[in-house]
Amino acid sequence: MIKILDKDLKEAAGKGIDEFLAVFTQAYWKEINGELNADAMSKLNGHQNALLAYSIFREEMNDGGFVQLIQNGYGGYFFDNPFAKAMRLFGAKPLSKLVYAAKKIYDENKKELERETTDEEFLSMYVDFEDFDELEEEFFMIEEETTNAIAHYVDENISLFAEIV
């Protein structure tokens, strides 16, 4: 089990929700040596994997939305794994619904969305896949509420995410 120092957790919690969650995800990245692959994922339990996935999802969405997330190789990671189900379990039901809606677009256009692109082709994908726009806007509207729900779930079930020492 991944260990987190109680003093580090309390200090981070005092700074805010983002910092509180980052204590966990930073420990996970350290445990997997910064590499996200099958071997690394096996070092984390399902709850830890889901929390790490949320941090990646949030970062990708804030940087470039679904097109970037998929072009960066995360399509299967989010849409072919139980990420949406885990988010529902964590109390983030609106995010779960949003991911399922995005999965439908992804599944219908997977080959095109995952193909190698030039910078120009990549940028044109934002026009070609405008169906994602509404979902991205929705994500930005629910992001704070979602992060709060996830932080609450982690706090209420902390032993599933790390051993606090």
Image: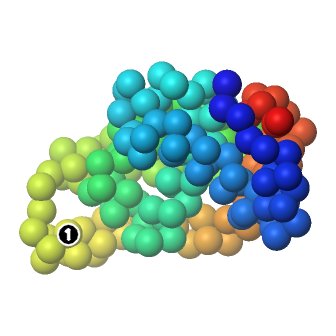
Viewer-nearest residue: 55 or 19: 19
Q: Quadrant of residue 111?
A: top left
Q: What is the quadrant of the C terminus in the image?
A: top right
Is residue 51 among the parts visible in the rendering?
yes
Q: How is the image coloured?
A: rainbow
In front of the other: 76 or 158 = 158
Image x and y of residue 51, in percent: 63, 43
Q: Residues within 10 Å of mark 1 (few under 14, many from 20)?
A: some
User: Total label count?
Assistant: 1
Name the residue tied to disc 1: 122
Q: Amino acid at mark 1?
A: Phe
Q: Is residue 18 above or below residue 39?
A: below
Q: Secondary structure at mark 1?
A: helix
Measured as percent of width and height from the top left, residue 150 is found at 76, 49
Please give left or right for residue 15 compared with residue 100 in the image. Answer: right
Q: Is residue 113 above or below residue 137?
A: above
Name the quadrant containing residue 161. top right
Q: Residue at x 66, y 56 (%)?
A: 22
Q: Quadrant of the N terminus?
A: top right
User: In the picture shown, does residue 109 fall above or below 156?
Assistant: below
User: In the rendered view, does 42 fall on the left or right side of 113?
Assistant: right
Going 85% across and 45% down the picture, which residue do you hit? 6
The residue lying at 36 percent from left, 47 percent from top is: 74
Q: Residue at x 79, y 54 (%)?
A: 8
x and y, in percent, of residue 30 in the image: 52, 44
Asked which quadrant contains residue 156, the reply is top right
- Using the rendered image of the protein, determine whether residue 97 is visible from the camera's viewpoint: no
Front residue of 36/117: it is 36
From the viewer's perspective, is residue 4 above or below residue 72? above
Q: In x, y percent, where is residue 19?
A: 72, 63
